[in-house]
Amino acid sequence: MSQPGSRSDRPAPAVRPVPAERPEIRVAAFGLAGKFQRILEIVFRHSRHNPYRFVLAASRGPGDYDLALVDMTARGGPEVAQTLRRLPEGRPIVTVGRREDPTRARDDLVLQRFALNVLRVLNGTVERHLVRPAAALARKAAEWFGVPDAERLLGRKARVLLVDERPTVRRQLSLALHQMGLDAEGVGTAREALDVIAVRRYELVILEAALSDIGGLRLTRDIKRDPALRGMPVIVLTCRSGPLDLLRGAMSGCDSYLVKPVSLQTLRETVARCLRKSLAAIARQPAAAPA
């Protein structure tokens, strides 16, 4: 038995919780030397009071990061930056290099002052390219389908159910919907979706056609055959784009069939259109007696 005051009797240090309002920004590093990647990890780990929680992205594939950091002094760095700028996702890019390089315009970050300036530059990039556009989009979303009307009708934000087996896809969709002023919840199977729909009301469902249990299109048909649920719009978001797939989608009764990859603008417009329909149906219903 340990003596009082020994190391084992001392209370464990409290872990500071990350505030819920502190958004996580995934940074993908391209061409950055190992030394600077380690500096980046240290800066990110100790920036607890920064308004954004930056993390190094586990993958640099399309859609797996929110912001790219490109070392322009590495071999092929300028070409990588050009390629990233041409991608349809349009992720913001921070260039790292040397100001005295006469072959290029001024880079966002200088290697000599990397550790001192990296957070400031990343914060500014997030503000310019992610936060302000998102705020503008939220205001436009209110014009598109009336978020205030949704809160007046429902007493809460409009709620969307995401059904996809891949957590990464659910996270990306959830982020896009939160930027529109919506609440989003995700499940991985069609059976889970039926379970939560039975006990919780949603104004929209976005699902993948290729679900491994009972299938997304069958789930759509089950929703549309249920008199209590058929007014809830369903958007199918899938990689299946063949003529028979499109025909099956139409026959399932879904309100929209989107083929990946889909632009954010198309997704937002489709969500807005379906929510207008859903909220209009709710507004036409007779007022329910208070519980």
Image: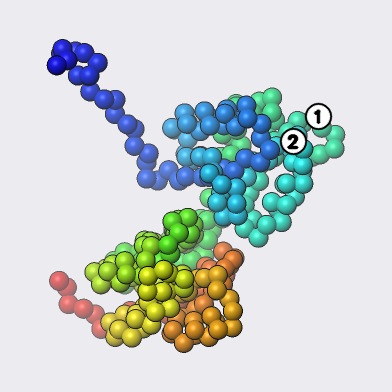
Residue at the spot of label 2: 74
Q: Quadrant of the N terminus?
A: top left
The nearer-to-camera label among 1 and 2 is 2
The answer to whether one can see residue 160 in this image is no
Q: Secondary structure at mark 2?
A: loop
* Dot 1 crowding, Cα within 10 Å, few <14, some 14–19, many 20+: few
3D distance between C-alphas at marks 1 and 2: 15 Å
Relative to 93, say whether 138 is above or below: below
Amino acid type at image mark 1: Glu
**Residue at 57 percent of width and 29 percent of height:** 38
Residue at the spot of label 1: 100
**Residue 35 at x, y = what percent?**
62, 26
Q: Residue furthest front?
A: 212
The residue nearer to you, when weighing 219 against 132, is: 219
**Residue at 82 percent of width and 32 percent of height:** 101
Amino acid type at image mark 2: Ala
